[in-house]
Amino acid sequence: MPAPVLPVSVLTPREPFEQSERDNPLRKIAFFAGLGFIFLRLSILSELLIYATHLNFYLLYIFAPPAILGVLATGGIGRTLRSNAGKFWLAYFVWMIIGTPFSSWKGESTFLVLGYARFVLPMLFVAGGLAMNWKEIRMLFYTFAAAALVNLSTARLLSKTDAEGRTVLAASGNIGNSNDLGAQLLLVLPFLVFVVLDRKRNIVLRLALVPLLAYGVWVVLGTASRGCMIALVAMFLFALFRATPGQRAATFAFGLIMALTVPFLLSSNVRARLSTLFSENNMDPGLAAEARESRDVREYVFKQSVKYTLMHPIFGVGVGQFSNYEGSEQVSAGNHGKWTVTHNFMTQISSECGIPALIFVLVSLGSGMLAVGRAYRMARKKGFRDIENACFCFQLAMIGYVGSIVFLAQAYHYYLPLMVGFAIAISAAATRYMSAEQKPAVLSPAPPLAVG
């Protein structure tokens, strides 16, 4: 009788090569260097040490070079560019280069593009090209969570109020400004949520993080950033829509408690500034005037950025040149220019780099979010709770951060390429892990039956 047909696993043509990439010790060294690199950038630890000691320890030079060299030496660029999200973000950078000769200030734009190539673009490949399995993705999540703890500690130790009552950091730097501080916290706080949801961790540790999350929300609202408050609402609604029934109940309870308590913990000036989203009645005349001035400036620069986009739709006015172009144009017309940024990352890109650049960015962000969304749906369908929670928290972070920078000019910061790269790594590792867990074991064919 013929031997029974047994299931066998079939390797795709790339799997042996990918296995060698995952086992490459150089890649593993580069990955750990990348973790340090990302942690230092998100935690702003280097800046804090300079503020505290007045000494530069050059910590980034310890971690960044081996991480970047590892990307180059172990195929990290290729792994990142297998994704449409990576390809479109690279296209955005190439468009910046192509448009630089058409800039209104070529020298300054050249300097900014070179800086982007050195300090910003590598984050795309470090995040997207070094992590190759789910264990390493979890380590990245915990790196973001650790940075969130440092950010919250920094806010606790170095925060102060400015003349308008808004929370700012005494240490200047990437998040010294109140709006930037709020956006940063909205990006990293969801990674603490991942730890809270992580059943592999001790329940005491997980519960201990809940008050820290509440403190983080209070700090975000304490910055009196109306854009960040809108982003917080968007995060809350997304959590209610996307979460499991149990998570939805916890989210609703957390939101209700925060809504009933936090307003009474904020200063009257902050409450008044945030309330201008709805009405300026019954406000202090000085605060009302400040709110109107801020709103008027933002409306003006938004309209100007749209105007310059339509005037220069292909290459814009030049990377980083909106404020200079607007100010010079107004002075030439006999007016006083605002000499300020666009306060909207999308019109910042379109007015300074052209409409094609904005399309590349939006398609890249959308592609990354869709890839993580597919991994989320697959994980939820097949019962991979850890992957489901990770994808949910990543999406929550993206909604919070992107929602906040709709009101900020952060088009050339490292956050977006970092998160696009992270989305690429999450999607690839999650898909690979779920496929491997369900793949049948390799069985040897049964020996032929002996005929007696």
Image: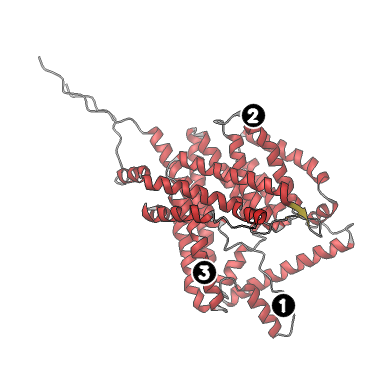
Q: Quadrant of residue 142?
A: top right
- Disc with the residue nearer the chain's start (2 vs 1): 2
Q: Farthest residue toward the left?
A: 452
Q: Position of residue 447 (x, y in %)?
A: 18, 23
The residue singled out by tag 1 in the image is 337
Q: Amino acid at mark 3?
A: Val
SS class of the residue under badge 1? Answer: loop
The residue singled out by tag 2 in the image is 204
- Disc with the residue nearer the chain's start (1 vs 3): 3
The quadrant of the rendering that contains the N terminus is: top left
The residue singled out by tag 3 in the image is 113
Query: Does residue 432 appear left or right of residue 187 in this picture?
Result: left
Cβ atoms at labels 3 and 2 below 8 Å apart = no
Closest to the observer, 4 or 21: 21
- Disc with the residue nearer the chain's start (3 vs 2): 3
Task: Work out whether residue 328 can be spotted.
Answer: yes
Q: CA distance from mark 1 to mark 3?
A: 25 Å
Q: Position of residue 432 (x, y in %)?
A: 41, 41
